[in-house]
Image: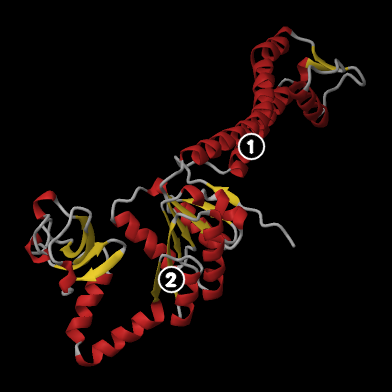
Amino acid sequence: MATARAGLRLPRLTPRRTPLTSIALRLGLALLLLLVNWGLVLVEADQYTDNADGHVSVIDALYYTTVTLSTTGYGDITPVTEQARLVNALVVTPMRLMFVIILVGTTLSALTERSRTEIRVHRWKARMRDHVVVLGYGTKGRNAVRALRLRDHPADRIVVVEADHAAASRASSDGYAVVIGSATHKSVLVEAQVERARTAIIALDRDDTAVLAALTLRRVAPHVTVLASSRESATAELLRESGATSVVVSSETAGRLLGLATDSPDAVSVVEDMLSFGSGLDLDERPVEASEVGRPPHACGVPVVGVWRGGRMLRYSDPSIGSLRTDDRILYVASRDDPQPLR
């Protein structure tokens, strides 16, 4: 069985030329120096001598130029006048040094870039913790990342795992660290530092792949919170059994909205508003404030729709809620168009 290889691609700190562009520019500059030196020798051809026939032709000038710039020369073609020797000392010699610096600099630049990349990757792995790993950067994955960013989640704390190179390039261009490889392979998830992540979001296109990814996630990171998306409700139970903390079924959600729209189109508009994160109505969650402890949920000053208590979600109408407790968290409706919560 082939071993999956994970490739880590970090977002660039500043826009830089590609390696091929840099090499092309350096070679272009080296060629320019060669042409300028060749032209100088041609202009002063009568002030040079060729030991073979005493005459310096166009080809002889090109030969002399290439040999002079790349080495110290062989002495078969030499300047014989003071003017030609002065031009060699003041112009050709600096050009020779520049030519060597360009060629050597290209090699050193490639080695330096590789070392710099290795150091940056090592530092990234050392400091990456409490981050969010998003498996898949398709429609679901991109929108999940967008929602995280709208909640002020820092971009450097989001890691995308994507097997498709086009989608991986898009995620990298958007400014996120990307691990290229299959989300169902352990080595890929280890490269994404998932064992030190706070949350993992499974936003893959296929349900069977999502189940395998959930199983692998639980093997690598038993304690991470796993949020998953599935197309069919039959897969949702498999995802939960595979270790997913919460599962969103896209087909059922869409079907319920269509059914609701038949009799209550205005209600669908409200739901769509809440699903369009970042504007209008949003669902939000926060811990109970000290002044709210011992009071009923409706006294919080915001429309509370549920209370998270002891690992369970209690609906606002559940009589067992009673008074709010110190370790409770409330789920409420907020308005992003208004800095103050809805009352």
Q: Nearer the viewer, residue 303 or 4?
A: 303
Picture coordinates of residue 107 (x, y %)?
68, 31
Write the residue at 54% across / 48% down. 9
Residue of label 2: 229
Relative to 208, residue 335 above or below: above
Tag 2 secondary structure: strand
- Left or right: 192 with respect to 153? right
Q: Quadrant of the N terminus?
A: bottom right
Residue 316 appears in view: no
Picture coordinates of residue 83 (x, y %)?
69, 10
Q: Nearer the viewer, residue 224 or 266?
A: 224
Number of numbered discs on residues:
2
Picture coordinates of residue 203 (x, y %)?
46, 67
Write the residue at 59% across / 35% down. 113
Q: Quadrant of the C terminus?
A: bottom left
Relative to 170, residue 257 above or below: below
Residue neighbourhood size for the residue with mark 1, other residues' Cα within 10 Å, grouped as few (<14), some (14–19), many (≥20): few
Residue neighbourhood size for the residue with mark 2, other residues' Cα within 10 Å, grouped as few (<14), some (14–19), many (≥20): many
Tag 1 secondary structure: helix
Residue 92 appears in view: yes
The kind of residue on which mark 1 rests is Gly
- Left or right: 327 with respect to 19? left
The kind of residue on which mark 2 rests is Ser
Q: In which quarter of the image is residue 31?
A: top right
Picture coordinates of residue 247 (x, y %)?
40, 71
Write the residue at 46% across / 76% down. 237
Please tell me which of labels 1 and 2 falls first in the chain: 1
Relative to 26, residue 238 above or below: below
Residue of label 1: 28
- Left or right: 108 with respect to 50? left
